[in-house]
Amino acid sequence: MSALGRLKRGSGSLEPKAPPTGGSIIRPASFCGVYALKPTWGIVGRDGSKTYSTTLDTIGWYGRGAEDLALLYEVFDRQPQAVRPFDLSKARIAVCRTPVWHHAGEATINALSRATAVLREAGAEITELELPAPFEQLIDCQVLIMRSEGQASFLPEYMTALERLHSTLREQVENVDGYTREGLCQAYDTAARCRMAFDPLAAPYDCVRTPSTIGEATLGLAATGEPIFNAMWTLLHVPCLTSSPPSR
């Protein structure tokens, strides 16, 4: 999944980030207009970070440019693959609005429209990619898996430091949602089927462009934004890149 902007070498400044379970790398980067990479799930070890969800947690990082992101990625990827030269004028780019497009705000709708027009003017071949069933189930599956696996991950803190644990995490340990092991297994199976289905869907394209947020960042510190446009991609275990707008 990619958002294309001007590739510009920075100073080599890189900032690691704790693993996202939904979109806590890509979404903040989009809000701030910086580059960020969430690599393919499993490429980077999670030692030293607090585990939330073994199925979802993915270590990623911020940088000043795409080439800087690649510097660190090359350290971790022990099975490097040849990358063919990229020519935007000949690129095949899929635009995927996803099954949650109805949540997109005006800013996101306009941004995706403008970006698509710019790419098309540059000569890229643009194709609309619609995801079939059961991809629409992945948002609910991601929440179920995250909160179910969070029960085990935060049980030690629940038992030893309950008063210091955020109420949201307490609720997960207490399973206030009433999730069952049967439901968790069904969510695992749905995610696995969608991963197998996505590879051939995406194979014809150089990248898939999709929204990172529902809109502009909210004011204040009470919330970090709605992750609904990120959750599905995290569960699919695909790499995600967000980039800053081109300089004018």
Image (cartoon, rainbow, N blue to C red):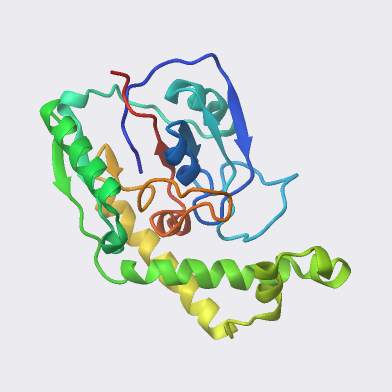
Q: Image check: 27 left or right of 154? A: left
Occupied quadrant, residue 35: top left
Q: Position of residue 96 (x, y in %)?
A: 25, 51
Q: Image check: 118 left or right of 49? A: left
Of the 4 image quadrants, the one containing the N terminus is top left
Q: Position of residue 67 (x, y in %)?
A: 45, 21
Q: Image check: 44 left or right of 101? A: right
User: Which residue: 28% across, 58% down?
Assistant: 98
Count of numbered circles on the image: 0
The answer to whether residue 78 is visible is no
- Residue 82 position (above or below residue 176): above
Residue at the far right: name it: 160
Q: Image check: 161 left or right of 184? A: right
User: Which residue: 43% across, 49% down?
Assistant: 238
Of the 4 image quadrants, the one containing the C terminus is top left
- Residue 70 position (above or below residue 203): above
Q: Position of residue 99 (x, y in %)?
A: 28, 64
- Residue 230 position (above or below residue 139): above
Closer to us: 195 or 145: 145
Q: Position of residue 162 (x, y in %)?
A: 82, 70
User: Which residue: 59% across, 82% down?
Assistant: 181
Closer to us: 51 or 219: 219
Closer to us: 162 or 3: 162
